[in-house]
Image (cartoon, rainbow, N blue to C red):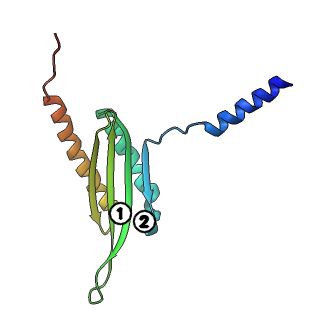
């Protein structure tokens, strides 16, 4: 009887304190851009897979923010601003931002900027002098 109670308590504690696996790709969207969440998430997954093969990347986060611009005299336009962050295994981060009228266009711009930054990062890592300990 006591064993069953202890066993049930252990199960309850494990269930309550079980840690969730961290997500590889996080897409945060609010407002009118929610329509594009699935397609942005798919593109982000593809990009993360590519970065993961090339570099030791732990996480890729994309935040989408939409805003209206203009004044009373000018018609308002909706702009989508995307912020992307790559977290590397050695805890270094890489940030990029893109803005466009279309969220998918902004995503392509963002991924292009991140590609350019990862190429710079790879070349810096390759050309960095190694310390030799004798």
The x, y position of residue 8, in whole percent, is 76, 31
Relative horizontal placement of residue 121, taking residue 89 as reference (left or right): left
Q: Within the image, what quadrant is residue 86 found in?
A: top left
Residue 88 image position (x, y, % from top left): 32, 37
How many neighbours does mark 1 have within 10 angstroms: few (below 14), some (14-19), or many (20 or more)? many
Name which of mark 1 and mark 2 comes first in the sequence: 2
Question: Which of the numbered marks, if any, corresponds to residue 74?
Answer: none
Secondary structure under the numbered disc 2 in the rendered image: helix
Q: Are marks 1 and 2 in contact (CB under 8 Å)?
A: yes
Q: Residue furthest right?
A: 1
The residue pinned by badge 2 equals 33
Relative to the observer, which residue lies in front, 27 or 14? 14
Q: Position of residue 125 (x, y in %)?
A: 19, 32
Q: Is residue 113 left or right of residue 51?
A: left
Q: Position of residue 97 (x, y in %)?
A: 27, 57
Asked if 94 appears above or below 104 in the picture, the reply is above
Q: Quadrant of the N terminus?
A: top right
Q: Which residue is mark 1?
A: 103
Q: Residue at x 71, y 36 (%)?
A: 12
Where residue 104 sits, quadrant-wise, is: bottom left
Q: Extreme top residue here?
A: 134
Say if 48 sits above or below 132 in the image: below
């Amino acid at each position: 009887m006591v064993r069953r109670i202890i066993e049930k308590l252990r199960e309850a504690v494990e269930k309550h304190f079980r840690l969730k696996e961290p997500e590889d790709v996080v897409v945060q969207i609010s407002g009118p851009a929610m329509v594009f969440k699935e397609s942005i998430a798919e593109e982000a997954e593809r990009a993360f897979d590519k970065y993961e093969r090339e570099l030791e990347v732990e996480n890729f986060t994309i935040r989408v923010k939409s805003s209206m611009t203009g004044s009373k005299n000018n018609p308002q336009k909706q702009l989508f601003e995307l912020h992307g962050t790559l977290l590397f295994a050695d805890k270094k981060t890489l940030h990029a931002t893109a803005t466009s009228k279309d969220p998918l266009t902004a995503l392509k711009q963002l991924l292009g900027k991140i590609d350019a930054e990862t190429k710079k990062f790879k070349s810096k890592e390759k050309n960095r002098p190694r310390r030799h300990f004798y």
